Amino acid sequence: MTRHLLKLSDLSAQEAQGIVERAIALKNSRDPAYRPFIGKTLAMLFTKSSTRTRVSFESGMVKFGGHALFLSANATQMGRDEPLRDTANVLSRMCDAIMIRNDSQADQEELARHSRVPVINGLSNLHHPCQLLADMQVWTEHRGSPKGKTAAWIGDGNNVCHSFIEAAQLFDFKLKIASPKGYEPAQEIVRAGGSRIELVADAASAAAGADVVITDTWTSMGQEAETQRRLKAFAGYQVDDALMKRAKPEAIFLHCLPAHRGEEVSASVIDGPQSVIYDEAENRLWAQMALVEFLLGMTPKA
């Protein structure tokens, strides 16, 4: 059966943890002779702009002997309203996997329904699972297993927040979420997170005693018209030095980037000693290549 990754919960806890462990092994090895994707092609469909998603998938495929095709909506028939089922049927006859970065989780599900090969969510309106594999990798590398620990999400209850909720289930940690009223994560996703998820009243309450503090931009792609309203709503949700002092002394700071210094995070935090954002960004490559291995059934046996 073809496996897809449209949301993190498409994986079992054992599978998700195994992918992170494999990503760490690939990163530590950096073996130039290991090229499992020779003859393999990844089609990358983009309707949203990207830096880290494109570069990590494309570079990763090249490093491991494969090839990646960058397909923007405006340069393909997707931009002329070709049905997704036709796109899926054609691409999956020519390529070994498909990555899509777009605005619609529903469209990704439609693409996967008609694809013969794995479909990977490179970001949607609801989820960002590849980011969370990289985040779990960087957490594990710097502070050991997330199991039994506490993460604090400060800010918009967006797609990354939703994937963090699912990560809390798979990696068995507590997630405290502080969002302004009207910007909380989707209730059905919070409910599915069960007792591991706690919605708290303010940023200070979320950060208290946390092992990891995470935030994201207050205005995501496609929300630019809301910028001023969001700046007002999110006042008091900046991750600054005072907020980090409420977390554990050894706490690390995560941000998926791009970041706006002076808005969701102060420069002193994101550029400070507790920030691991560049390791986090690099891990997109390693985690995603471990994921492609897994979805193609190519992960070496232990």
Image (spheres, helix red, strand yellow):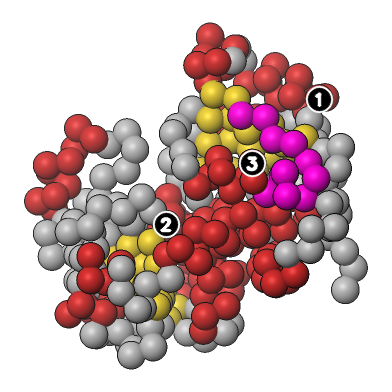
* Image coords of residue 88 (percent x, y): 70, 25
Residue 9 visible in the current orientation: no
Q: Please name the amino acid that badge 3 sits on.
A: Glu
Q: Identify whether 230 is placed above or below 202.
A: above
- Report if the CB atoms under discs 3 and 2 are less than 8 Å apart: no
Q: Is residue 63 magenta?
A: yes
Disc 1: which residue = 94
N-terminal of the pair, mark 1 or mark 2, is 1
Q: Name, please, the residue furthest toward the top.
A: 80
Observer-side mark, 3 or 1, equals 3
Q: Is residue 204 magenta?
A: no
Q: Identify whether 145 is placed above or below 186.
A: below
Quadrant that contains the C terminus:
bottom right
Q: Please name the amino acid that badge 2 sits on.
A: Cys
Quadrant that contains the N terminus:
top right
Q: Please name the amino acid that badge 1 sits on.
A: Met
Residue 117, by quadrant, is top right
Position of 201 with respect to 161 (left or right) is left
Position of 196 with respect to 91 (left or right) is left
- Residues shaded magenta: 60-70
Q: Name, please, the residue furthest toward the front.
A: 32
Residue 221, by quadrant, is top left
Disc 3: which residue = 58
